[in-house]
Image (spheres, coloured by chain):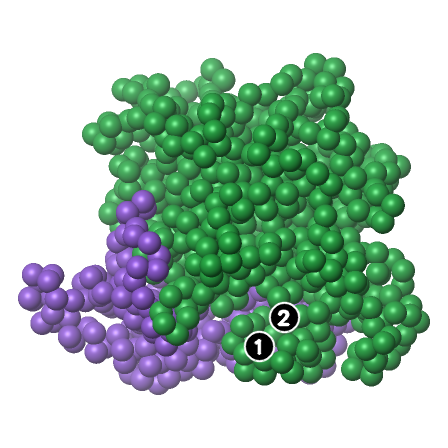
Amino acid sequence: MTMNTEGNGTMLDPKVPEGPIQDKWTKRKFDVKLVNPANRRKYDLIVVGTGLAGAGAAAALGELGYNVKAFTYNDSSRRAHSIAAQGGINAAKNYPNDNDSVFRLFYDTVKGGDYRSREANVYRLAEVSNSIIDQTVAQGAPYAREYGGLLDNRSFGGAQVSRTFYARGQTGQQLLLTAYQALARQVGLGNVELFTRTEMLELVTKDGRAVGIVTRDLVTGEITSHSAHAVVLATGGYSNVYFLSTNAMNCNGTAAWRAYRKGAFFANPSFTQIHPTCIPASDEHQSKLTLMSESLRNDGRIWVPKRADDTRAPNEIPEDDRDYYLERQYPAFGNLVPRDVASRAAMRMIEQGRGVGPLKNGVYLDFTDSINRLGRQTIEDRYGNLFEMYERITDEDPYVMPMRIYPAPHYTMGGLWVDYNLETTIPGLFSSGEANFSDHGANRLGASALMQGVADGYFVLPATISGYLANWLNEPPVPTDDEAFTAAEQEVRDRLNRFLSIDGTHSVDYFHRRLGKIMIDECGMSRDRKGLEKALEQISALRAEFWKDLKVLGTDESLNQSLERAGRVADFLELAELMVRDALDREESCGGHFRLEHQTEDGEARRDDENYAFVSAWQWTGEDSPPIRHAEPLEFEYVALTQRSYK
Amino acid sequence: MNLTLRVWRQPRRGSEGAFKTYEVKDVSPDASFFEMLDQLNERLNDQGEEPVAFDSDCREGICGTCGVMINGSPHGPQSGTATCQLHMRKFNDGDTITVEPWRALAFPVLKDLIVDRSPFDEIIQAGGYISANIGAAQDANATLVPKPAAESSMDAAACIGCAACVAACPNSAANLFTAAKIAHLGLLPQGQPERYLRTVAMVETMESYFGSCTNFGECETACPKSISIDVIAWMNRDYVAAQWKNLRKQGQQA
């Protein structure tokens, strides 16, 4: 094992209950200390972020009777990027009678994650998946139905069963709205206080535990301290470190990064997912990339011309001159291989000069066969809104011309390290959803992000958090005039003033774009030592330039979007470096982390289970000293470690 | 493309505002409307003028964060399209484009093109939900939902809460928004127990902020999700029905 190569790293204990995997969650729910209903109102809790994992947690904790404050930088708690998830949500209901089970969902997810996730967490996720469908149906999510009134399912990448529940191409929207409405109900009842257009800029700790946060009112600029018995960060992922990603413009890593700098370990930062089916970039002013749901791969066939110099229009290229490369290379899964596999295959085609479109930066996703087989109406029913979105962006009609797609940064499997209870290494600080690292290993399967967001928010966190809270019964929260809060507020003000006083020559976006270029080139779909080492130098130089040459106009006492972005990009400039360090440190390929030095003869990821079957958890040690890498060993008792094959 | 923009600039809530004219050059027809504004902002920042503030998040037409009046139309000229999905190829080289925030008394301007839409959240908080506590649900297939009901419910549930309907309405009414939620929940079996209480609570909260509907139908035209005003008729019927349904109040018959 190379777990301690960094010298002073330690082994982390994930606090997984003993016993058979089927019993672990039941056992934890029984073992955990409870807070009785009358005592819950004595506790103040903070939830940051109102996506599925945050709104869900805030609503669930409010229903239980805690005093909850929920925060979002958006103007409403209905905006978070969970809303953009398109294809669906997995659950092990086995309604289609195709041999699915909790164990199979667990197995597929561990395998899909390329054996870099914690078995006990993944099993729990599969176990509660069925309750998610029950709960969201009860709350009014209008899932797709069969004519008899029963729920419909479809298949998704990385699985050979149909276990994905969906609401047209807007499943994330409908799930977020149920969580938003559950939260709105609690706000209306007075159990949750909601702060919109309010951004968390610092975590406050005292005596080693989380005691509150410092926020900025994005309209007035007012800096405020909020105190609580425990803090939950449900602040999403950091794919925007790449500048161009499928994430919303405001998605950022600041809350997690502030927590990291206060002592929370950051796990597997380099594990990022590059999603295979996005619309290719068209020019340099592009502000984001748009995802086309993976569900399209159910009925679309992916191909490129066999010859690199083929300039014919797609409809003029005969079957014999087309290479349906996924069907050729992976006959068992075909177009439904997991995302990391599909993305790398597309990358190889483009590297061979067989890319399509004006910039030769795409591959075809072709619906002709499905339209001929099923009729245009069926395809329209299944994907109508996605086809419309595609046409709006590209001005091409996908019913007639094959779509052009290309991989784009989409999801970050890495995040704050949490134990089985979703508690970070700072006592009293919890993390749920994409913001934590826990369930997807080195690659997330489609329709599993919604599953994790709801599972953590509705079912896991509300059950585990009482174990921590019970220790603080009848202890009031730390008052906000305590030195811990006033010092944190001062740091926040100083930092904002620093951005405003640099008075350099370039906008925040200028630096963000350059950072994104470094990251996608050197720490994107494939990585190697030379490139990563170069990236470390480039990021460090760019960071220095940022702090010398940034230009933010306006004041901190009003709505100032440049100032908001400055803080987020400053944190991305630090987080990017940690991602690169982690990618360098992990001398193997697994899932989305593909080191060119470690591949099989046919170009698949080659894991090194002997030396790297662990979670890397990084600890901040200060501005000028390198972080320490700790490790959580991963044991695979139920899913045998094998070379992942989708052939 | 080269364009002339007339943009509403207003430093803060309650302060004076005015149109300011800017030239934007070399805009790609494939750029989205906001990418064009990003380009303007980058230049303004370089020249020492504060960038134009506007709300935008997902840029996929689903989060509902964005929305501006473009030449007097909410979300601009393309039907069924949020501002973030509008592309410059829908304009002509040399056009003058007027860009304003949503117009409605209930939505005060916070800065430039950004308004406060929090009354929408209050309407939902008043009753736009099904009271189903987490953990208490039965098996998802225990309640059958006829496919046509699920489809109509989904049509209404597609609302993104952007408020273009209010901005388009000569009366600044929020009936389309409110009715879409009432229809989404009221069309499903799960939504029946609270159906009439929900309708009254939401309609009355709506009326405390917004004007009255007089069936102009501008809202349907402006809606980026093309939600039909049929839902308003549905809401009105339930609101009238609620007057006696709620009086019965035994709750035994929805």
Q: Earlier in the sequence, mark 2 or mark 1?
A: 2
User: Dividing the image into 4 quarters, which one contains the N terminus of chain B?
Assistant: bottom right
- Residue A379, numbered circle: 1
Amino acid, disc 1: Ile
Q: Is residue B205 left or right of residue B45?
A: left
* B250 w.r.t. A608: above or below: below
Q: Is residue A623 left or right of residue A435?
A: right
Name the residue beneath numbered marker 2. A299
Chain in purple (letter): B
Q: Measuring from the top left, give residue A436's x and y in whole percent.
A: 55, 37
Give the quadrant of residue B88.
bottom right
Q: What distance separates the C-alpha of mark 2 from that of mark 1?
A: 8 Å
- Mark yes or no: residue A519 visible: yes
Instruction: Please report the residue visible at 82 percent of the width from the left and 68 percent of the height from the top.
Output: A323
Residue A215 seen anywhere in this rendered image of the structure: no
Extreme residue in the bottom direction: B216
Relative to A387, is A65 on the left or the right?
left
Which residue occupies 30% across, 26% down? A34
Chain A colour? green
Asked if the residue at tag 1 contacts the one at tag 2, i.e. Cβ–Cβ closer than 8 Å, the answer is: yes
Does residue B202 sit above or below B89 in this rendering? above
Residue drawn at point x = 64 percent, y = 46 percent: A112
Decide: few, some or many residues near mark 2? Use Cα within 10 Å; few <14, some 14-19, many ≥20.
many
Q: What element carries label 1?
A: helix
